[in-house]
Amino acid sequence: MPKIEIYEEPFYRALGKKYGNEELIELLTAAKAELDEHLKDEGLLKIELNDTNRPDLWSMAGLARQLNIYLGEPITGYDFFSTKEELKDYSSRVVEVDAGLKSIRPYFAAFVARGRAIDEPQLKDLIQTQEKLCWNYGRRRSSISMGVYRADLIDFPIKYRAVDPDATSFVPLDMEKELSLRQILTEHPKGVEYGSIVADYSLFPFLEDSKGEVLSFPPIINSAHLGAVKVGDSEHLIEMTGTDMESLLHAASIVACDLADEGYEILPVKVIYPFDTPYGKEIVTPYYFQSDVTMDIDYAAKLLGEKLTVEDGVRFVLKMGSKVKVKGSALTVTPPPYRNDFLHPVDVVEEIMIGRGMDSFKPVWPEDFTVGRLSETEIYNRRIREIMVGLGYQEMIYNYLGSRRDFMERMNLNGEDIIEIANPMTENYEIVRNSQLPNLLSSESVSANGVYPHRIFEIGKIAYKDSSENYGSVTQNTLSFLIADGEAGFNDANSHLSALFFYLTREYSLQEVEDPRFINGRVGGIICNGVKLGIIGEFHPAVLDNWGIQMPCVGAEIDIDLLMGKE
Amino acid sequence: MDVETYVKGLHPLEIKLLRKYKSGNKITSSGLISELSYNLGQCNQAFSWLSAKELIEETKRVKRVEYELTGLGREYREKGTPEERIYQLIQEEGALSLPELAVKLVLEKRDVGSAFGSLSKEGLLSLNADKQVMIKDESRSEKLESRRQLLDLFGGELEGNTEQATISETELSPEQAELASSLSRKRGTGRGLFRVTEREEVTYGITAEGEKVRRLLIDRKISGEEIGVITPEVIKSGEWREKGFRGYNLNIPPLRVLLGRKNPYVEFLERLKDKLISLGFEEFDGPLLETEFWNSDALFMPQFHSARDIHDVYHIKEPTHAKEIEQPSLDQVAATHEDGWKTGSRGWRYRFDRDFTRRMILRSHGTVLSARTLPKAKIPGKYFGVVRCFRYDRVDATHLADFYQTEGIVLGEDVNLRTLLGLLKMFAEEVAGAEEVKYVPGYFPFTEPSVEVHIKHPELGWFELGGSGIFRPEVTEPLGIKVPVLAWGLGIDRMALVSMGLNDLRDLFTQDIERVRLRRRK
């Protein structure tokens, strides 16, 4: 979930009053936001935004807008949005998209904001908006990236091209020398960070104006000349490229509304595609693409468990920032341009809930009678647990993820049925355990200072590959136990196994097996009703040595699913 | 401590001593040995216990030298010293050579040599012309006599009682004492007739407090002969009918026992489950490995959602994909993502990827199982699971790579936001013991509306207990459910930690046996 930093002074100026922290926390719930930290010395508020479908709240301007409307300020429209029916004047501001981009990074949106010298907090907020939108909403720039430029230096039409990365070069931001696009991927920090988005293509996205002045190499880095925005600049070109047109148009709408709220005039830009897009071959941005959503007030009343009139519905929807029309008991909501989260009438229900206020809903006890029940497995697990405790064992509980070292190398196993994680974060968590025995041995290896004997067990899940299954793997409920003691031997473990099976009304026999984890001749497969459901044996000193254990250990592992006769 | 308490806690050794001696009597270990048949160890125990309780006190301390026969000394006392034996043999058999003496007496040559030397020096024996030993003086040697007397002191009435075969220096004449000392084993030599021990003999007397205890013992007829450990013989013989039982000191620290025990965290989870079934919930469970379909697609999270990137879930190296996804769930979910299907939603408006949806991952949240339960759920129905989930997170005190999540659903014709709040209130009070409850709007991709519940916990203060909401129609309808479904999840690990006095999540899964053995729940 995104976290933003905003300056108190402009934020409270926008809200028209200064709030204490307690008051602010209360107010922020209307935007599903939480005050994370208040840095008093720097005059900064750190705020966490919980709704990942509301990127419009991830900036000072957007958050202030939502809260102001909630507090009663009238909804202001924005007059610079084009729609399917009406194109706004784009003057000579045109962007031409190259056909080669269709399979690389096809979509483009832009506008110019002018009329106000940008100050320090505003520039920071704009950069933060860019980061949050592109990182969280734009999936680390892969579906949306954004650039800001000095518009007064740009000559339209702008060309959005697919170019040879080795034959094209410019001076990127924060560097002094010219680099080819290919070099930027390895030599510029942003190239290193984001290069993988374009690296596999033979041509790279590239943005220049009609005179050949370079704007940027999207989605990586701006040019040092046109792409270096400074405090005091008053005319900015905002541009976005990406792979998903809808989220791109949405992101552009958010930034346009934010800048408009801060006093900028927004000038549309026309984008011309040589291929079809979901919104045609020519589109003027910012572009309003939301559809109205119609909801019956009775639907909201049923879901919220409260009587609601149409007037109530209208009042609460307006309080959350959408315009609404009424026909009978139906409310037709027109979402504001900066929002793209009205998918279903149920989304209007939540607007009414928040608009009405959480405190206005009184909890009622659920009335339906239902029978509570533990799962069969849990009931059986508890039976086993009780017997193991009676046998004098301490129950342990372990992580299910582990390392190849512990589960393969130290056990003298090649681990052919072990499930490996494709993207492990560390080597300590790179496989899903296929046995509990390594966990029990790991306990023994760190517990030599604890009074002996050690008798431990675990009931839990393991998983292993099984190509006959739909998922290619099986999750199995498993019991394992271990005795470590100077006098621990096979017979002790077998006595306990025998007691366990007696009380579970099961019979077993042991079948000689060879297993590199155990001493040959002192390890048996546990056979019950003709099926092998476990193993019991004395651990081989070579395995104990791998774990740094100097105490004899004997253990067993049993498939509980088979034992309880589960299908 | 009062007298009563002393009386109860006394050991038979103490009781017998106290009963035997009045105030003013001199109490010594040799006295106890002869009068109460204590051995020296018992004497010392009785002295040290009673002194600690200040029932007796030290009155005098003397250094005492005691002699005791060594093995050699005992042999000489019984068979005679080499000198005596040589003298006697020659008296009986006439003159013999030194080697003949050694053979006949089974003595070592050097012992024969030194005994002869000592006797000839005294003028009792001499060598004749044939180098045979002969008697020179028939009168018995004074030296032989005094040595015999000394050795015989250790016999007599103490015969057979080797333990008591010690004689104090004070019991010997000065001449005897000197002789005994000269015949004692010296440091560095193995041979000697006597072993010398020097010990301090301490004399004790009964204190005023001791006298009170003593009177009480006599009044109560406590003899010290009461039964101690009760054995089958005690019961069988019936001796308990005659004798009383000795009371034990109840406050001696007991020995540690290694017992079988549930893991306290498992016990916490069991109680949680019991609580939930008492509230009418039925338990569900499922596989650790899941498909993208059930983990996210069925929950209407778009496939391009940022939370579904490689950095947020663990992918499986092999097999990478499930063979198939259940129908009609797959078609209906896919259609709902693309255009809303029949749910009244506009959908996410993208091309649903049917390969991606089969991709295998480690389940990242318990809501997977809520989704899986929907196609077969009863209405009305309540379900829950406490299930292991996996998160792509750096492991530290507040984040684990795998951990338990507690999640569930409530299905019913008439469930709504207010019943959801009621449910949360029930959890807050029944599961968490909350003092106050607060609800705030929340966000989850699969619920609308969504509500978070914050509670004031008696020990943790305010914290977020859980998240909840009403499943979106885009979640329930493609899985065949037409009624509203309340979905909830509880964060219980902080309560688990506080109940065990821990503050690091990693401790829940510690490997250390001793730490788990000693861990307790409040």
Image: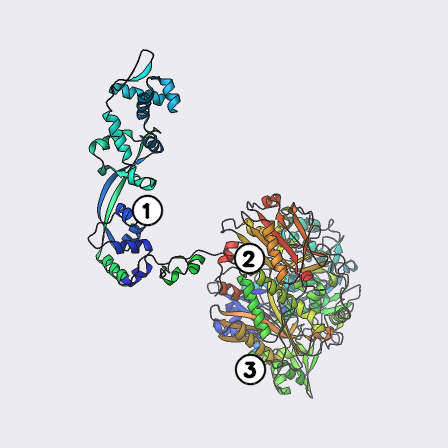
Which is closer to the viewer, label 2 or label 3?
A: 2
Percent of width and height locating residue B219: 26, 63
Q: Secondary structure at mark 3?
A: helix
For label 3, the residue is: A360
Does B377 sit above or below residue A378?
A: below
Three-letter residue code for mark 1: Asn
For label 2, the residue is: A393
Front residue of this view, candidates B247 and B362: B247
Percent of width and height locating residue A41: 46, 63
From where the camera sits, is residue A65 visible?
no
- What residue lies at 35% left-to-right and 17% top-to-bottom? B96
Chain name for mark 1? B
Front residue of this view, candidates B60 and A165: B60
- Distance, label 1 to label 3, CA atoms, is 87 Å
Chain name for mark 3? A
User: Badge 2: how crowded within 10 Å, few (<14), some, or many (20+)?
Assistant: many
Three-letter residue code for mark 2: Tyr
Label for residue A366?
none
Three-letter residue code for mark 3: Ser
Percent of width and height locating residue A507: 67, 59
Sequence order check: which comes first, mark 2 or mark 3?
Answer: 3
For label 1, the residue is: B39
